[in-house]
Image: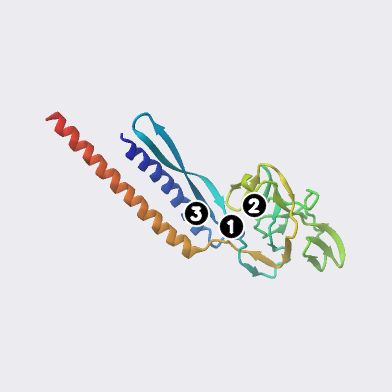
């Protein structure tokens, strides 16, 4: 296969991955705490002996948008939204993970957990415990949980030590390869949830662009295949 076909195949592969990412964004446009994702295309250039250069495009690096999503009032005592640059820290069977999805509820032990049962952690890394008889429960902007004016614990807000090392896991959860640190300047809103930061219209437009680009590349490959087939048939004759 000639270099032009190899180059086109690498481009097609990247476009297919981008289509999957865009489709996932659109599917999660209404998911609480979801972060829009994109692909970064890069070019690999190699000099060929006596035949010039060949450049191939790859799209293996995923980029997550950290733009603030819309905040909606729910009135729920354990619904929490973050304003600013920060994440909740939760404990999962695979280890600690970061999330912006703040729909929590107490489990049978009184710990606040996600809908999947992952425990919310406080500023010291311990489970956030709410006594069953806690009345007039309030959460202040700095994460302090109080009952009848008496502080109980403080919900932790964290951020990754290295933003480039933030890896998405299971939709709204992220893993920080380099660890986490307290988030400065971020605040918590009680009775609110942060929605997805996906822009559905721009993602639909991007899906159309990617589809057209893929179809163009496929047309080129079909033409190239037909050219090679015709040349081989001419040699055989």
Question: Which of the pair 151/55 is nearer the observer?
Answer: 55
Q: From the viewer's perspective, is 171 left or right of 18?
A: right
Residue drawn where x is 77% and y is 56% of the image = 155
Q: Nearer the viewer, mark 2 or mark 1?
A: 1
> Would you say the residues marked 2 and 1 are in contact, meaning their CB atoms lie under 8 Å apart?
no
What secondary structure is found at the residue carrying circle 3? Answer: helix
Q: Which is nearer the N-term, disc 2 or disc 1?
A: 1
Q: Specify the quadrant of the image occupied by residue 84.
A: bottom right
Name the residue tied to disc 1. 34
- Provide residue 42's location: percent of width, then percent of height: 48, 44
In this rendering, the answer to whether 229 lies above or below 142 is above
Q: Nearer the viewer, residue 82 or 235?
A: 235
Name the mark on residue 24: 3
| Number of residues whose C-alpha sits closer than 10 Å to that of mark 2, classed few (under 14), some (14–19) or many (20 or more) | few
Q: Separation of disc 2 and disc 1 at Cα? A: 15 Å
Vertically, is 78 above or below 182? below
* Mark linked to residue 78: none
Residue 235, position in %: x, y? Answer: 15, 30
Q: Image quadrant for the N terminus? A: top left
Q: Residue at 36% across / 43% down in the picture?
A: 8
Q: Quadrant of residue 179?
A: top right
| For residue 90, side relative to residue 227 (left or right) | right
Q: Which residue is mark 2?
A: 116
- Residue at the far right: name it: 150
Describe residue 15's horizontal placement relative to residue 2 as left or right: right
Residue 73 at x, y percent in the picture: 66, 70
| Residue at left offset 62%, top offset 62% | 68
Q: How is the image coloured?
A: rainbow
SS class, disc 2:
loop
Dot placed on the residue nearer the N-terminal end, 1 or 3: 3
């Amino acid at each position: 296969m000639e270099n032009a076909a190899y180059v086109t195949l690498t481009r097609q592969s990247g476009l297919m991955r981008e289509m999957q990412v865009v489709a996932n964004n659109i599917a999660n446009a209404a998911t609480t705490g979801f972060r829009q994702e994109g692909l970064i295309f890069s070019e690999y250039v190699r000099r060929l002996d006596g035949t010039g250069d060949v450049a191939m495009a790859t799209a293996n690096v995923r980029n997550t948008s950290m733009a603030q999503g819309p905040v909606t009032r729910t009135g729920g005592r354990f619904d929490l939204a973050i304003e600013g640059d920060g994440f909740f820290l939760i404990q999962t069977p695979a280890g600690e993970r970061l999330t912006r999805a703040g729909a929590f509820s107490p489990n049978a032990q009184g710990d606040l957990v996600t809908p999947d049962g992952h425990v919310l952690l406080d500023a010291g890394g311990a489970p956030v415990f709410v006594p069953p008889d806690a009345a007039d429960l309030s959460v202040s902007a700095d994460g302090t949980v109080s009952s009848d004016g008496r502080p109980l614990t403080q919900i932790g807000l964290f951020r990754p030590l290295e933003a480039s090392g933030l890896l998405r896991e299971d939709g709204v959860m992220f893993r920080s390869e380099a660890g986490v640190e307290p988030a400065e300047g971020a605040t918590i809103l009680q009775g609110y949830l942060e929605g997805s930061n996906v822009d559905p219209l721009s993602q639909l437009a991007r899906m159309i662009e990617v589809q057209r680009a893929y179809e163009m590349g496929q047309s080129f490959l079909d033409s190239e295949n037909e050219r090679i087939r015709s040349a081989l048939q001419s040699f055989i004759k």
